[in-house]
Image (cartoon, grey):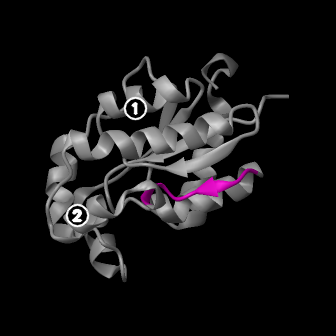
Amino acid sequence: MRTPQVVVVMGVAGTGKTTIGPLLAARLGVPYAEGDDFHPRANIDKMSAGVPLDDSDRWPWLDAIGHWAHGRAGLGGVVSSSALKRAYRDRLRSVAPGVVFVHLTGDRKLIGDRMRQRQGHFMPTALLDSQFATLQPLAADEAGVAVDVAGSPEEITERAVRALDALPSASV
């Protein structure tokens, strides 16, 4: 039996991290933490104003997520984080070396449509292009899987569970 893994659900805004994360956590029988809850107020204010975060804004946020993930090592957990750049994922791994990533991927139009439909979120659709410009997909040497976001949340979650199950044990 595998040790429960700590999974970071990553991707650009609007891919469904906040929807898929809790569903995945429930399927894995582990707790879920919402990555947006780790943002300091200044970050939320900045994004709400339509201003993309810079790396100096992200480091404390990524460290807080990494500390949560580290605390779940051996116990399992799921946390959301855009983790768009390799450097951000490296930062998370420096604090929580065993994390594995589920990269939610999809068509720009589909993701934009979903963003326009959601209510009460601080991230405006106008920042989606900057998110795609920043995105560095998982590299072959990074523990993780890419999962397409087409379909229902349940279908996406099922694809994520199957993809995680298919990872070699050494990767998780």
Give me the residue at 30% from left, 44% from top.
58
How many badges with numbers are in the image?
2
Circle 2 crowding by C-alpha within 10 Å: few under 14, some 14–19, many from 20 = some
SS for callout 2: helix
Give me the residue at 23% from left, 58% from top.
108
As drawn, is 146 to the left or to the right of 43?
right
Which image quarter is the N terminus in? top right
Give me the residue at 61% from left, 48% from top.
78
Q: Residue type at mark 1?
A: Arg
Residue pointed to by mark 1: 89
Q: Position of residue 68 (x, y in %)?
A: 58, 43
Say if residue 170 shows up in the picture: yes
Q: Position of residue 150 (x, y in %)?
A: 42, 60
Circle 1 crowding by C-alpha within 10 Å: few under 14, some 14–19, many from 20 = many
Give the residue furthest to the right.
Answer: 1
Q: Residue type at mark 2?
A: Met
32 or 70, which lies in front?
70
Q: Position of residue 85 (x, y in %)?
A: 29, 35
Q: Is residue 77 magenta?
A: no
SS for callout 1: helix
64 or 118, which lies in front?
64
Task: Give the quarter of the image for residue 26.
Answer: bottom right
21 or 72, which lies in front?
72
Q: Which-is-in-front pick, marks 2 and 1?
A: 2
As drawn, is 21 to the left or to the right of 113?
right
Give me the residue at 51% from left, 25% from top.
143
Residue pointed to by mark 2: 47
Q: Which segment did they paint magenta? A: 30-36
Residue 151, compared with residue 161, is above or below; it is below
| Mark pair 2, 1: CA separation | 20 Å
Which image quarter is the C terminus in? top right
